[in-house]
Amino acid sequence: MKKTIIVLICLMTGFAQFSYLHAERRLIYSFDTADHNAEDWIYYADQLIFDEAYLCSDSTSHLRDVLTQGNTYLLKVTHMAVGIEQVDSCFTTFTYVPEGYDPEDPYVDNGTLAFSDQSFGFYNIVNSAFQDPDLFGEDGDYTEEEIEGILSTYDYCFIMAETSYTRIKIEIYEY
């Protein structure tokens, strides 16, 4: 009898915690590479980059239309490599400070929703970052792929710090 009561209390506690964690959680953004063309992924500097054209393909909404400055969101990224599925998630705040916006300031936050160690996240959600016209120089130090990779990080993009994935699913929940 005592064991039954303990099991029931544990079940009720677990159910209460599960209910609390999932209360008012609303999916506001979902992107799955299985629904898009994987050949459009950009690889640069050991990073996987999804640029604006790829993220907004198939009428996927732009994040600036669904995020509110200062709100906290759950950013969940499910990634698969060699048939092994892993999930990374974090609570993060959508940051953007429109007052005093200076497009030539290299440290300006153009809208960010990312994991604190920057291993994955969305960047330049509201505005494009300033592009230094002298960046590529006249020597042609960069290949065409490198230039594409660099330029893709100046506009609205999603970046992951690894490149060995075969499928990525991104979800954003509002709390």
Image (tube, rainbow, N blue to C red):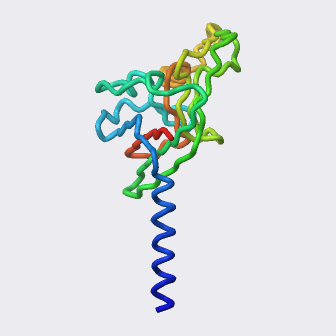
Q: Examine the rendered structure and indicate whether residue 31 appears above or below residue 146.
A: below
Q: Residue at x 62, y 7 (%)?
A: 133
Closer to the camera in the image, 108 or 45 = 108
**Residue 32: quarter of image:** top left
Residue 29, image x, y percentages: 40, 34
Q: Which one is nearer the viewer's eye here, 33 or 150?
A: 33
At a point 33% along the width and 25% down the height, the residue shown is 57
Q: Is residue 144 left or right of residue 129?
A: left
Q: Going by the image, does 78 lie left or right of 37?
A: right
Vertically, is 66 above or below 105?
below
Q: Position of residue 44 (x, y in %)?
A: 53, 31
What is the x, y in percent for residue 140? Answer: 58, 14
User: How many marks can you see?
Assistant: 0
Which residue is drawn at the image coordinates 41% and 43% (left, top)? Answer: 168
Residue 139 vs residue 171, the one in the foreground:
171
Q: Is 63 left or right of 154, judged from the image as shown? A: left
Pinpoint residue 160: horizontal percent, then vertical percent: 52, 39
Q: Residue at x 46, y 92 (%)?
A: 1
Quadrant position of residue 161: top right
